[in-house]
Image: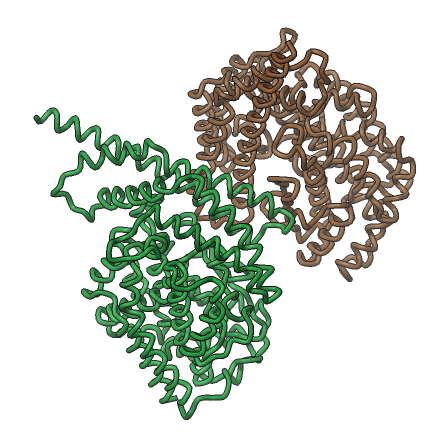
Chain colours: A green, B brown
């Protein structure tokens, strides 16, 4: 028996080693493709677009072939047979096996023909969407969206879903595993009603200025760049293992904890927006730089989910970057970089500008409060589309009705309505909620940080951010995919995700503004 | 028979299609690795070096696995069996088969263990060389170089060589196929003796200034950048399909004719050197941008060899960029960009500076005339090392003796002697001659251009370069690997490579300077 057991253990160990070696190499190829994506947005000459698409399609195919390689199934089976039922389910090996099994099953459940048709259709649909948005012509995009909904339902059928659930749940697993629609609804619905009421209170603040106090204050981008680099480095972003560049839309991208790249864009008319965007992307970048090197290119070295990634970016953008103590430290820095143009700017001006609530039509321009309502509208609509409760042709009317109801905003055209975002044009259903979930997790985590470090806000006032970052490193960044997001929330805060922390945070912002 | 023939033809066609599809994808992976190399030099944060090495090692392994895939051998055999003995050996299909056969045989002749040991040793030897150069300690590098020589001989044994030839020939095929040492020697030996005499005549010119007239003329790099972009665009480099950036050492890199990237470096103390370097790299880039799109990622869409690539860069750097007519056009452009600092610069000053001959110790700083002597020294020494006529321990003395003999220069230390170049530290024997061969091909091709376009120099004087580029596009860039370099030279000039055109060109430069 002893000899047989050690033989099995040796088989298991070698299967695990082979599996991990294979998975690491697959992830390196995926990382190379992400670097090509970064280059495409930041560096690539325009004429190279077609060749770059070919490069990335080849890498995507190689990655897919490796993920679905039958040897992966064999290695997983050998490891699972060998695993002790009494082993720690949260050990690195157990976590890697859990996640690689999930990834393998998910990838092999889809027929190659459906993967290819989805990729091909996404490319065509994206072109249709660009033209439809430009011409404000939803009807021109509707057939492509309808086909996307059909293909998404086919994918959901292949993947399957929980008996208490629905097809949408299967799609959302791509972005946020273990987070079915009914769980999101349970948090979003109470949040929505109270947010609508809260927005009204922000608008009724008697000392509210009529417009953001920094609107129309032109600043040289080179000076803004110096400011952003100083702030981003001070909050902890390591420029020896990262970069900051400009691109049409800010994003962050990582191939390894030692190569994390942020982008921002400079707006000559708004001095604070690029700083917020850079702090947001730096929040993502800090997560990537903090992932554990010993588990790199395996699930134990990867981020939990999109919502948890977003929670890290929102922490720095909103919970740090919009708070009054932060601006005690940052305003003099800002004035040193930007010079005479902002000499008259007061901390009161900045706090109003950073926390100016105003219902608008465009998600990416929304403030911290109304942003969540934009997301809920999209969640409700895509759930209805996938579930068959809403026909594609009725989408614009349904969209506009919800904007009226939740945001009190009249949508003048589909360009500023249901055609504004690229996500559905790419076939990504289940992505949108992760943005608001990120805000919710950020709020709930931040209450836990404040409990652990009561003087945190005082630290911000003197430009000290290391304790917050150390807390994130310990509880989140270093943990890889050990926990999925609901379990991580329980592990950190002792409670399931709740709307209360975010509502408390936003009510605190309201009180802060009222006292200015 | 008819039916059998068409069956065979169909088999052959489908084997050829499969072969080309495979080869194209392999080349895309190699191109991705080149882009990672570009990023490494231009963009990558320093901390990411180890991960980048892992990425590129993985891609190199995948490329090698694909090149040596036994299916490639089967497809080639099927195509060769099917090929008509009366077919055009220069048709795209015949050329692709010829080159892919060569590539497959060459790759499969090496055992994987030797490939891996060479790669591993190259990495270790490179580190040893960096330390040895820094400490001026050849003895510390000698064991690594000796091992490189042994490994190179083993590779040569695997590859084999012509009965009239020698092991060095087999190594040089990596860079310059069909160009054995005896063929190089036949051109280099007469060139060498006459160059040594020619250098003396340059030094004795009675109107020669004591130093280059632009030495120590500080210019803002941003202004230099504007100048370089205008010149590079005017000679025909397409910035819609390319970039110009800065790096520690200038280079050019291409992943596709639509994505060609040049780098340069700005020297605040020398205004002309960055321009020369940029024209050199743009010459490489024009070749890459001119490769035929229909044959992209196959041999018919690739450059002939390193020497032919170098001939294109040298044409623009030397034959255009150092000629008096070019400076009729360029001097006013230069003054417009660089302003007051160069207001006093005369065309005579520039021509002396661009053609200032001065024997020096460092190859990469050498002028157009003495550069070839630096190369010949390296060729003679590496040939003796590989052939067993020179022991590694005797390299410094042999190096120094040749510098004394050919350049009249005393080498004060190995750092400025045989440790100056990285090539041998990487195990690259057979690479150096391609630089001088490039100059020789450039000269011989340029005489052919002048015969076809007698007014070429007058065109340069008015900033017209399109006819020269069109000639290069037609005779060289669009031809891919149709001809190997000796055959290309015969096809274009009707003669084998000869030292005479380069000597005529350099004697012309001497006369031009004498008349200033």
User: Extreme top residue here?
Assistant: B163
In the image, what residue occupies the spot 16% across and 46% down? A88
The front one of B270 and A236 is A236
User: Extreme bottom residue here?
Assistant: A206
List x then y, in percent, for residue A68: 37, 37
List x then y, in percent, for residue B329: 85, 50
Q: Quadrant of the C terminus of chain B?
A: top right
The front one of B137 and B439 is B439
Tell me if residue B156 comes above or below residue B135 in the rendering: above
Tell me if residue A399 comes above or below residue A202 in the rendering: above
| In this rendering, position of residue B326 left or right of residue B28 | right
List x then y, in percent, for residue A389: 38, 63
Q: Quadrant of residue B481?
A: top right
Residue B398 can be seen, yes or no: no
Q: Quadrant of the N terminus of chain B?
A: top right
The front one of A56 and A251 is A56
List x then y, in percent, for residue B490: 79, 21
In the image, what residue occupies the spot 25% across and 71% down? A447
In the image, what residue occupies the spot 47% across and 79% down? A409
All told, the count of numbered labels is 0
Residue A468 can be seen, yes or no: yes
The front one of B72 and B124 is B72
Q: Quadrant of residue A485?
A: bottom left
């Amino acid at each position: 028996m002893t000899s047989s057991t050690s033989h099995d253990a040796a088989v298991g160990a070698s299967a695990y080693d082979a599996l991990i070696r294979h998975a690491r190499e697959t992830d390196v190829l995926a990382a190379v493709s992400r670097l090509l994506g970064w280059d495409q947005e930041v560096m690539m000459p325009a004429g190279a677009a077609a060749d770059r698409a070919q490069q990335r399609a080849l890498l995507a195919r190689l990655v897919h072939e490796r993920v679905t390689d039958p040897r992966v199934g064999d290695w997983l089976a050998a490891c699972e047979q060998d695993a002790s039922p009494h082993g720690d389910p949260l050990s690195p090996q157990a976590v890697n096996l859990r996640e690689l099994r999930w990834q393998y099953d998910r990838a092999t459940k889809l027929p190659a023909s459906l993967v290819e048709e989805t990729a091909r259709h996404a490319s065509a649909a994206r072109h249709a969407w660009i033209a439809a948005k430009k011409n404000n012509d939803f009807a021109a995009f509707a057939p492509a969206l309808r086909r996307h909904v059909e293909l998404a339902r086919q994918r959901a059928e292949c993947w399957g879903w929980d008996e208490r659930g629905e097809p949408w749940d299967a799609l959302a697993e791509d972005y946020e595993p273990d987070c079915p629609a009914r769980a999101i609804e349970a948090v979003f619905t109470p949040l929505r009603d109270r947010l609508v009421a809260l927005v009204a209170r922000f608008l009724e603040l008697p000392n509210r200025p009529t417009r953001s106090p920094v609107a129309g204050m032109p600043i040289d981008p080179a000076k803004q760049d110096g400011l952003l680099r100083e702030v981003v480095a001070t909050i902890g972003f390591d420029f020896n293992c990262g970069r900051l560049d400009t691109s049409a839309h800010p994003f962050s991208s990582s191939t390894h904890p030692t190569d994390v790249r942020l982008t921002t864009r400079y707006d000559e008319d708004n001095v604070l927006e690029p700083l917020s965007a850079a702090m947001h992307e730096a929040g993502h970048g800090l997560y990537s730089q903090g992932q554990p090197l010993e588990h790199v290119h395996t699930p134990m070295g990867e981020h939990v989910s999109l919502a948890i990634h977003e929670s890290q970016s929102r922490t720095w953008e909103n919970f740090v970057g919009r708070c009054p103590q932060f601006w005690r430290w940052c305003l003099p820095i800002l004035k040193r970089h930007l010079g005479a143009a902002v000499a008259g700017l007061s901390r009161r001006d900045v706090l109003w500008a950073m926390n100016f609530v105003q219902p608008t039509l465009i998600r990416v321009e929304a403030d911290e409060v109304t942003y969540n309502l934009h997301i809920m509208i999209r969640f409700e609509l895509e759930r209805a589309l996938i579930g068959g409760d809403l026909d594609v042709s009725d989408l614009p009317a349904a969209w506009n009705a919800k904007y009226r109801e939740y945001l009190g905003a009249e949508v003048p055209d589909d360009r500023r309505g249901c055609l504004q975002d690229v996500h559905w044009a790419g076939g990504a259903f289940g992505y949108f909620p992760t943005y608001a979930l990120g805000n919710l997790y950020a709020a709930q985590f931040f209450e836990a940080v404040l409990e652990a470090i009561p003087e945190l806000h005082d630290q911000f006032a003197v430009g000290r951010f290391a304790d917050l970052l150390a807390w994130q490193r310990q509880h989140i960044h270093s943990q890889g995919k050990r926990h999925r997001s609901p379990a991580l929330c329980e592990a950190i805060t002792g409670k399931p995700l709740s709307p209360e922390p975010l509502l408390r945070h936003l009510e605190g912002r309201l009180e802060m503004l009222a006292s200015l």
